[in-house]
Structures are given as C-alpha cells and as structure tokens.
Amino acid sequence: MTLEVMAIMTEVLLEVEKLKKYFPITGGVLGKKTGDVKAVDDISFFVNKGETLGLVGESGCGKSTTGRMLMRLIEPTEGKVVFDGKELTSLSESDMRKIRKDVQMVFQDPFASLNPRHTVEKILEEPLIVHGIGNKQERRRKVREMLEVVGLSSYHAKRYPHQFSGGQRQRIGIARALMTKPKLIIADEPVSALDVSIQSQVLNLLEDLQNEFGLTYIFIAHDLGVVKHISDRVGVMYLGRLVEITTSSQLYEKPLHPYTQALLGAVPIPDPTVKVNREILTGDLPSPANPPKGCAFHTRCKACMEICQTDRPVLEEIEPGHYAACHLYKK
C-alpha cells in the first residue's frame, strides 16, 4: 500500500508533495549565484485529521524549514502543499492570510516569539483583530477564557511577557495559536527551551487541548523521547530528506533505517543496570550545500553498499504502514 493510497483511505487534512527549499549561495564582487543550500530536498507526506505527526532529526536537517514552508513564512522552491483541499503554494498573500486562521504555529523560543512591548491581552487579541473576529468586548472575553484554558489566570491579561516564566510564556504562545480555532497547529520544538519538569506540563497541555478541540499537530523536535510521548506517526529527516516514516510504536520497536537506529541508540536510558549496544555515528554531517550523491547517509553508514554511493533510494513501504528510503530493503 502506497502513501497515496493510505491518504485516500483516511481523512487527510494536509498533503505535501515533492517539497523543496533551496537557498542560493552567492559570491564574488558581483554576487553571482555559485550554488544552493538544499535545506529541504524533495519530501512528501500527509497528515490525517486529529493526529499528531512528529518530525525528528539532527539540527540542520530541514525540519523547521519544512514547518515554515507549510505556513508560507518561507516560500518553497518547488512542490505542493494542499491543506483542507486548497493548494497553498499558488495562493496570493491576501488569500494565504485567510488560510492562516486555520493553520497556526507555536514557535520554539517563548522569549523571542512574544512582543515585549505588548500586554498579554494585546498579544492574544491581535489574531482576532487581523481576522475580523468579534467586537472589542467579545475579543477581551475570549482572551480571558483562553488564558484559563491553557492553565493561566484571567488577571494575567494585563501583564507583560517579561513578568512570566519560560513555561508560562509558552502557554501564552499556545493560547495565541488557539485564538482563531485552527484546524492545524505546527509546533516547532515548543518544549526544547524549557526545563524537563515544565516540558511534561506543556506536552500534557497539548494533548489535552487536542482532545478538547479536535486539533491536528505537526510536532517538530530533535528529542526522540518527547516525540514518542506525543506523536501518532513519526517522520525521520536527514539532510533535507525523509528517510523513514511510520507509527510511533513501530518506529521505536523496529527502526529500519540505519540513521533511525543510530538516533534511537543515542537516547539515554535512566537505568545503570541496562546495557545497550550503541551505534556511534562516525564522520561529520555533510553540508546541505554539497550533499553526497546517492543516499545522503552513505558517508556515515556502516551498512553502506556500492549502490548507496550512486543511486538515491526512494521512500518505499517495507512493512505495512512502515516506509523507509534504504537500499538494504530493496526487493
């Protein structure tokens, strides 16, 4: 069963097809283009309504760039993004602004994503003003209701961001994303800047909100433990490409791609009596400005074969619902 067939059989909210983002490299006195940084290089996936898709990988693998392209905060170089039946990459800026009512984002840094000059009330009210929702009295009532939903108090509305802790600021960021009742929330490493104890609170909050409002999440992270806790399916990215995608349980029980196996082997186990044979990756992460030919991972892979150095593997179904881009499983 292909990804396309699975998407048809379920209620798909978002479908991404052959998405690319190349940043030009310029040099010389005249600033001529000398190459491209291939931040995202031909990825395809879909997200069903009501599910959480996790995107994981090392820093620089393109997962945050992918999230920003879905919002059109960064314009794609190529590819299609279809949200709720609408092709986003062809929309005008004014039409895209209307779509953002249904697609919201929670940013990584709760310190930088909130305007320090505005009160919380003004920060949360702004999305409603932009989209013409309610009058002034209705908007302010909604602000106070949403603060209660995310675990804060209504009197916090008159405070400024610097008067809150990191966890509280991220709750404000989540509240802002919820103000327009979106269908999809893209969470870009929403807990990586928080203490471990606060991380669990925010993750539990996101799960509770998903159940209450029927939300769909794309959860971007580099912490595999966090992703396992919240995701229904997980996509693993390496150097701008998707190398594996399957359900969370399948990925953690039986990872197929050597890169995924190395990532999971690096996760610390809080039990000194348990011995783990860890797969230590050798070599440096290749540059996205000059990615290796064939499989992008072959320069660091112990299972590398001759074909890996010349032919780029495609994402194929290896087991039911389990896809990997690896020549080890080529039939």
Image: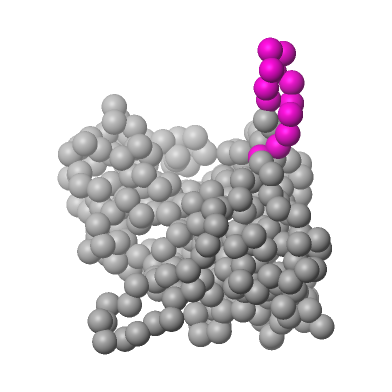
Q: Quadrant of the C terminus?
A: bottom right
Magenta run includes residue 30: yes
Q: Quadrant of the N terminus?
A: bottom right
Residue toward you, 155 or 96: 96
Side of 250 where 3 appears, left or right:
right
What's the residue at 72%, 13% (across, down)? Answer: 30
Percent coordinates x, y for residue 285 in the rendering:
56, 53
Q: Give the dominant element type of the magenta stretch: helix, strand or loop.
A: strand
Residue furthest to the top in view is 29
**Residue 282 shows in this picture:** yes
Magenta run includes residue 126: no
Q: Is residue 182 above or below residue 271?
A: above
Q: Is residue 113 above or below residue 33?
A: below
What's the residue at 28%, 46% (across, down)? Answer: 169
What's the residue at 34%, 32% (across, down)? Answer: 115
What's the residue at 25%, 38% (across, down)? Answer: 161
Percent coordinates x, y for residue 5 in the rendering:
78, 76
Residue toward you, 263 or 221: 263
Percent coordinates x, y for residue 304 in the rendering:
68, 70
Q: How many marks?
A: 0
- The stretch in magenta equals 26-37
Percent coordinates x, y for residue 175 in the rendering:
36, 51
